[in-house]
Image: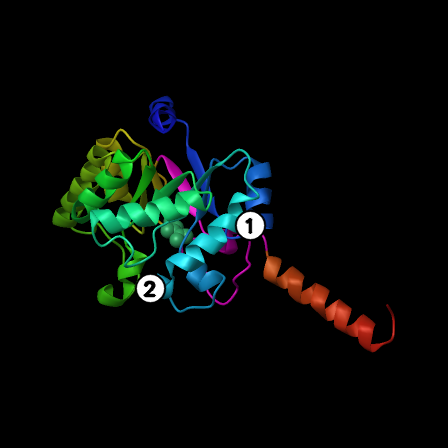
Amino acid sequence: MQKFRDRKQRGERVTALTAYDYPTARLLDESGIDIILVGDSLGMVVLGYEDTTQVTLAEMVHHTKAAARGVKRALLVADLPIDTYNDPGQALATARALVEAGAHAVKLEGGVSHISQIEAIVAEGIAVMGHIGMLPQSVREEGGYKVKGRTQSEVQGLVRDGEAVEKAGAFAVVLEIVNPEAARQITRALSIPTIGIGSGDHCDGQILVTHDLIGLFPWFTPKFVSPEARVAEEIRKAVQVFIERTRSGES
Ligand code: KIV
């Protein structure tokens, strides 16, 4: 995992996208992405839940196994779902289950509050990616997906979170929906790469939910995403052609 710190020092940006199944993971891997995340965002874009708070470890294991079959080259990271890392022992057991399913590393949400969990996992030789800023597993308590790091005290808190996560042994940290200026300050304060989502251009890398990037979840697209394709439209067109062909008796 030293390689990620070295990349930061050389100013090389890290690329990361989500995958929850074999074909998507294989396509991303073959395209040269650095990190493939089996994110608990699968709760919304694959399983149809309202948010990530209903995702279970069994679901994460199932999708991690599928994605792992498609990965030869990229680093495969899997999310610890909500309420599966409430203490260091539980965090370690969950991380082991995801590594057994094929993940090379795990990600968990939280900064200063989750240091003992990160330390316990890293001590077992399992690589950890941190996740600070907006924490989707806390969306219900927070009352929505709100920008973090708007005030000086929030920025200081985020820098402390980032530093604590780095000290605990994480090899990189996701900054989700963090004010770009705050993201710049966190990025400067850390030696591990910051990987931003909706946090501006000053991070050391970027991550997106692949469904958002390729327009495969047309019912909701976060404001900060510029889709590069309209896959949902292509599916609708192909299905329409198939329906018309079949109804008209063509094969
Ligand atoms: O679950 C997920 O996909 C994530 C990314 C959005 C960072 O955590």
Instruction: Tell me, for residue 70, which label it has, or none.
Output: none
Left or right: residue 219 compared with residue 236: left
Left or right: residue 187 compared with residue 72: left
Q: Residue furthest right?
A: 250
Magenta span: predominant SS is loop
Instruction: Tell me, for residue 53, which label it has, or none.
Output: 2
Characterize the local packing of mark 1: few (<14), some (14-19) or many (20 or more) Cα atoms within 10 angstroms: few
Magenta-drawn stretch contains 236: no
Residue 96 in picture, x, y percent from top left: 35, 44
User: Quadrant location of residue 127?
Assistant: top left
Residue 178 in picture, x, y percent from top left: 28, 49
Mark before the other along the chain sequence, 1 or 2: 2
The answer to whether mark 2 is within 8 Å of ligand 1 is no
Question: Residue, x 66% and y 66% (percent of image)?
Answer: 236
Element marked by disc 1: loop
Span highlighted in magenta in the image: 204-229
Does residue 64 appear in this view? Answer: yes
Look at the image and name its color scheme. rainbow
Note whether 137 is above or below 164 in the view shown. below
The residue singled out by tag 1 in the image is: 228
Question: Residue, x 34% and y 25% (percent of image)?
Answer: 2
Characterize the local packing of mark 2: few (<14), some (14-19) or many (20 or more) Cα atoms within 10 angstroms: some
Left or right: residue 155 compared with residue 90: left
Question: Residue, x 18% and y 43% (percent of image)?
Answer: 116
Q: Amino acid at mark 1?
A: Glu
Question: Residue, x 50% and y 49% (percent of image)?
Answer: 65
Q: Amino acid at mark 2?
A: Thr
Does residue 202 appear in this view? Answer: no
User: Quadrant location of residue 12?
Assistant: top left
